[in-house]
Amino acid sequence: MRVVSFGLGLLVLFATACTPGAAVEAPADEPELVLGQLIYTNNCASCHRPDGRGGRGVQLNEGKVIENFANPADQLALIANGRGQMPAYSARLTAEQLDAVVRYTREVLNTAAAGE
Ligand code: HEC
């Protein structure tokens, strides 16, 4: 029994250590931002990392997304149409989901410091 729980403990430790940055929580009283977080976690975090610091995808947090897209509509167009290695999401996400993920990256992820 002891060996089994030791093994489980190790597994939990290992899983925690391998999480590449925690998801940045949207405020619970903002349903559109909560939806944006869900979309981001399921579609974007694999490349841009949960905290937006970048990896296979470019960095989105620490002001980058606002710096590079003064106008949110331009950011939405990039996500919808894709660019280079960045996939196009116009056929995968609804207009509502695109709006939500743009808001989430600008209003929640953007202000989160990398690697926290
Ligand atoms: C397969 C990996 C991958 C996935 C999945 C992905 N991206 Fe990207 N993304 C990239 C890469 C690579 C770039 C850089 C594109 C280029 O300019 O060559 C990028 C660029 C961007 C940019 C522009 C950043 C800038 O400052 O120019 C935004 C915004 C963005 N992605 C948002 C998202 C969102 C939102 C999602 C999920 C809906 C997502 N990405 C999913 C790889 C990915």
Image (tube, rainbow, N blue to C red):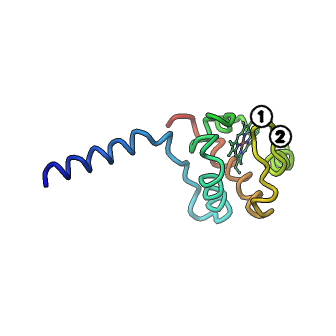
Badge 2 amino acid:
Ala
User: Residue 73: x, y in percent?
Assistant: 86, 50
Numbered tag placed on residue 70 in the rendering: 2
Q: Quadrant of the N terminus?
A: bottom left
Q: In the drawing, does residue 105 fall left or right of residue 12?
A: right
User: For ligand 1, which image quadrant applies?
Assistant: top right
The local secondary structure at tag 2 comes to loop
Q: Report the label total.
A: 2
Disc 2 vs disc 1: Cβ atoms closer than 8 Å?
A: no
Q: Amino acid at mark 1?
A: Glu
Task: Tell which of 112 and 90 is nearer to you.
Answer: 90
> Measured from the top left, where is residue 83 in percent x and y?
82, 40
Residue at 86% across, 45% down = 74
Does dot 1 land on a helix, a strand or a loop? helix
Give neighbour class at mark 1: few <14, some 14-19, many 20+ (Cα, 10 Å). Answer: few
Residue toward you, 75 or 86: 86
Residue 95 in percent (x, y) is at 80, 62
Front residue of this view, candidates 112 and 52: 52
| Badge 1 residue CB within 8 Å of ligand 1 | yes
Relative to the observer, which residue lies in front, 42 or 38?
42
What residue is rendered at 24% in x and 47% in y? 7
- On residue 22, the disc is none
Ligand 1 within 8 angstroms of badge 2 C-beta? no
From mark 2 to mark 1, how far is it between C-alphas?
Answer: 6 Å
Side (left or right) of 51 relative to 107: left
Circle 1 is placed at which residue position? 67
**Other-residue count near label 2 (Cα within 10 Å), few / some / many at <14 / 14–19 / ≥20:** few
The residue at 33%/48% (across/down) is 12
In the image, taking residue 40 as reference, residue 4 lies left or right, namely left
**Residue at 75% across / 38% down in the picture?**
85
Residue 100: percent from left, percent from top: 72, 58
Is the residue 16 above or below the residue 67 in the image? Answer: below
